[in-house]
């Protein structure tokens, strides 16, 4: 099992550009999550999904969108990137609200 | 909304000393989970506690869940350089809640 995979590992965006962060898991987990982690800080929940076709906002959803068309994939879309979105983005999956498995992260810089 | 605070925010210890981080939630938790994040890495699950007053051990690590299920602690005995990282607690506010609220984290550094 590959676990949770994320692409890309690194990305530099210019202000106003858009991009999609990819996340996939092969553990057949129903729950998936997107977090952001600013330098030296904790994890903030952006969006989450409890199953295909179901998504909900977390603590900091503004400026992001998600979709969940399959159990395996949970892409995060950034529209009109802003410097405040410079962060490390982690995708995670779990079975119910138990142990979460995290991907390696995407380091995004917006300049 | 639910808030989960951890103290201390930072801890520097000499190798071989003990270390404890405390986790306090503003609401009752259905379970408490602990994660470790190495510098530059991603959070990795350590353990989950479910029962009031539960204590679990993993080698030099001892985890405790409070009687009221609103607080928890992680104690490391005789720290080693491999213990370096940030320790986060996390918990859902009630049974069946899909979201985990992560604590603010405690960053542990070891002085060799």
Image (cartoon, coloured by chain):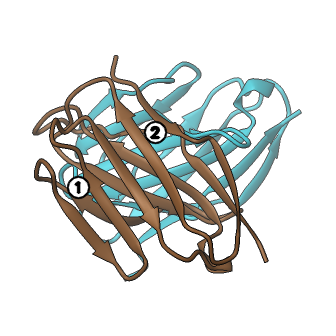
Q: Are marks 1 and 2 on the same chain?
A: no
| Image point (39%, 25%), residue name | B3
Where is B91 relative to A98, above or below?
Answer: above
Please give the chain letter of the residue carrying mark 1.
A
Q: Could you say where residue A46 lies in the image, as x and y percent from the top left?
A: 47, 32
Q: Residue at x 25, y 60 (%)?
A: B48
* Spot occupied by residue A87 in the image (x, y as percentages of width and height): 70, 40
Position of residue A80 relative to residue A111, above or below, is: above
Please say whether residue B102 is visible from this viewpoint.
yes
Q: Which chain is cyan?
A: A
Q: Quadrant of the N terminus of chain A?
A: bottom left
Q: Dot 1: few (<14), some (14–19), or many (≥20) neighbours within 10 Å?
A: many
> Tag 1, which secondary structure?
loop
Residue A70 in view, yes or no? no
Q: Chain of mark 2?
A: B
Q: Position of residue A102 (x, y in %)?
A: 46, 61
How far apart marks 1 and 2 lie (CA) works out to 16 Å
- Name the mark on residue B52: none
- Residue A98: give its label: 1
Q: Could you tell whether A85 is left or right of B92 in the image? A: right
Q: Colour of chain B?
A: brown
Of residues B53 and B83, the one nearer the viewer is B53
Q: Is residue B91 above or below residue A83?
A: below
Quadrant position of residue B101? top left
Which quarter of the rendered picture does the C terminus of chain A lie within? top right
Identify the residue shown where x is 59% and y is 74%: B79
Q: Which residue is mark 2?
A: B103
The residue lying furthest to the right in this view is A111
Give the residue furthest to the front.
Answer: B17
């Amino acid at each position: 099992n590959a676990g949770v995979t994320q692409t890309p590992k690194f990305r530099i965006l210019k202000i106003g550009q858009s991009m999609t962060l990819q996340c996939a898991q092969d553990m057949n987990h129903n729950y998936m999550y997107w977090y952001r982690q600013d330098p030296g800080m904790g994890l903030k929940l952006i969006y989450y999904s409890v199953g295909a076709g179901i998504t909900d906002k977390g603590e900091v959803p503004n400026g992001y969108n998600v979709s969940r068309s399959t159990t395996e994939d949970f892409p995060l879309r950034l529209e009109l990137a802003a410097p405040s979105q410079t962060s490390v983005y982690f995708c995670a999956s779990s079975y119910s609200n138990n142990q979460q498995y995290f991907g390696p992260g995407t380091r995004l810089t917006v300049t | 909304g639910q808030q989960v605070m951890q103290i201390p925010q930072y801890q520097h210890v000499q190798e071989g000393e003990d270390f404890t981080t405390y986790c306090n939630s503003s609401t009752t938790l259905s379970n408490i989970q602990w994660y470790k994040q190495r510098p530059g890495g991603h959070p990795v699950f350590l353990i989950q506690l479910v029962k009031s007053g539960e204590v679990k051990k993993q080698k030099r690590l001892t985890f405790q869940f409070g009687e009221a299920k609103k607080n928890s602690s992680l104690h490391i005995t005789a720290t080693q350089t491999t213990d370096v990282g940030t320790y986060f607690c996390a918990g859902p506010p009630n049974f069946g809640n899909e979201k985990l609220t992560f604590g603010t984290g405690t960053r542990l550094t070891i002085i060799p």
